[in-house]
Amino acid sequence: MGNGVSIVRELEGDFIEISSDIVVLLADSVVLKSDVAALLADSVVLKSDVAALLADVATLYGDVAVLLADVTTLKSDVVTTSADTKSLSKKSPPKCAGGDARLFFI
């Protein structure tokens, strides 16, 4: 009979230890639930940030396209100006009765 009492006391000790472990696990699960909720909130914010960045990228692509068009126009203008300059430099200056009609400013 003494042996039975000792087994019961050992089982009671094990039960108390298991109960204590369950309380710790429940507390941990509450903390984990809170952490998961915080992570979900962060993911919503990150999703919003990514959407804003994608919109910015789309705007930047548009800006780059406009700049490339401007560069193409400028390149064309430079070619035209260069051709005009060459054409003008080949022409002789107008003459007048006294000779060269160019004016020099001092």
Image (spheres, rainbow, N blue to C red):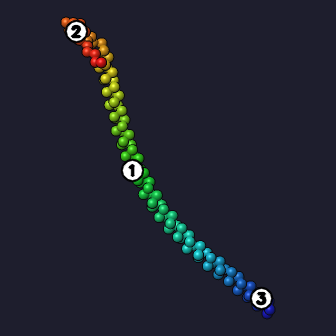
Label at residue 55: 1
Residue at horizontal 79%, vertical 89%? Answer: 3
Q: In which quarter of the image is the N terminus?
A: bottom right
Residue 53 appears at what percent x and percent y?
42, 51
Q: Which of marks 2 and 3 is in front?
A: 2
Look at mark 2 in the image and give the residue it sits on. 95
Dot 1 crowding, Cα within 10 Å, few <14, some 14–19, many 20+: few
Q: Nearer the viewer, residue 99 or 81?
A: 99
Of mark 2 and mark 1, the one earlier in the sequence is 1
Disc 1 marks a residue whose amino acid type is: Ala
Above or below, comparing residue 95 to residue 67 in the picture:
above
Look at mark 3 in the image and give the residue it sits on. 6
Residue at horizontal 20%, vertical 8%? Answer: 96
Q: Splitting the image into 4 quarters, where does residue 60 fall?
A: top left
* Residue at the farthest left position: 97
Q: Which of 97 and 43 is in front in this view?
A: 97
Q: What element carries label 2?
A: strand
Residue 11 appears at what percent x and percent y?
72, 85
Dot 2 crowding, Cα within 10 Å, few <14, some 14–19, many 20+: few
Q: Splitting the image into 4 quarters, where does residue 106 fall?
A: top left
What's the distance in space between the residues labelled 1 and 3, CA to CA?
Answer: 73 Å
Disc 2 marks a residue whose amino acid type is: Lys
Contact (Cβ within 8 Å) of mark 2 with mark 3: no
Above or below, comparing residue 32 to residue 81 in the picture:
below
